Image (tube, rainbow, N blue to C red):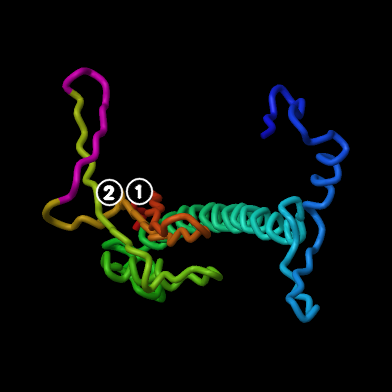
Amino acid sequence: MFAVKSGVVEGGLERGLMREFLRNLGKVWTMRDAAGYGTRVGKGLLDDAGGAILEMAISSSILFAMFFGVFELTLASYTYHYVSAAAREGARFAIVRGSTSCVNTRNLSNCNASPTMIGNFVKRLPYPGINSAANMTVAVSYLTATTDTSTGTTLTTFAACASGTCNQPGNLVSVVVTYAFPLTIPFVPKKTINVTSTSQMAVQQ
């Protein structure tokens, strides 16, 4: 019988034998049968062969996941700038194609544009890497100006146009562009981020 207490080997096992035993844990042992044939049975408990490959696999997975995450966030930022620019372009398209545009500018294409025409114009804007047909929605509305002078000063407010000629000069056109950005990062559940931008401008003609 022997015991190990506080790092000191007690009993009949000498310290030198214990050191030799620990050194042999990392060696390859051969078991021989009665005929003398040997069989390699593997390495001891202290062998670390293959550990570097495992560490590389784990660290590479984490590193590449971080890289793909950065790429996806960069694409999301690009998508936001695209949506913002698309909303402004749609508003610019609409303000010069109001109710009087066909008379004021006779050769203007798509004059007196409807909300559907404005939305189709926005979706046809050529931006690389953007799937506008499947992931984009465009909402176009008009706001009517109301002037209040009861307080002695002229106060102009805008409310949603519900009737009449909504795209007449002086009214506001509001273009809201929403893009469903598919966020895909390794080891992270897939999700869709709705990127939205709104642009409002006064109809000129």
Does the segment drawn in magenta span residue 159?
yes
Q: Which mark is residue 171?
A: 2
- Residue at 36% from the left image edge and 60% from the top image edge: 94
Label 1 crowding class (10 Å Cα cut-off): few <14, some 14-19, many 20+? many
Amino acid carrying mark 1 in the image: Ala
Judging depth in this view, the residue of 119 and 54 nearest the camera is 54
Q: Give the quarter of the figure containing the N terminus.
A: top right
Q: In this view, does 73 lie to the left or right of 183?
A: right
Q: Where is residue 138 in the image (x, y as percent from the top left)?
A: 32, 62
| Image marks 2 and 1: residues in contact by CB distance under 8 Å | yes
Does the segment drawn in magenta span residue 134?
no
Classify mark 2: helix, strand or loop. Answer: loop
- Residue at 35% from the left image edge and 71% from the top image edge: 120
Q: Which mark is residue 132?
A: none
Label 2 crowding class (10 Å Cα cut-off): few <14, some 14-19, many 20+? many
Q: Position of residue 174 (x, y in %)?
A: 32, 51
Q: State the residue lying farthest toward the top.
A: 151
Q: Give the quarter of the figure containing the C terminus.
A: bottom left
Q: Is residue 137 above or below residue 17?
A: below
Specify start and end residues of the magenta stretch as a single range.
150-161
Q: Where is residue 2 in the image (x, y as percent from the top left)?
A: 69, 32
Would you identify the image quadrant in which residue 18 lies? top right
The disc, 2 or 1, on the residue closer to the chain's N-terminal end is 2
Q: Residue 202 carries which label?
A: 1
Amino acid carrying mark 2 in the image: Asn
Would you identify the image quadrant in which residue 103 lies? bottom left
Q: Position of residue 35 (x, y in %)?
A: 77, 81
Classify mark 1: helix, strand or loop. Answer: strand
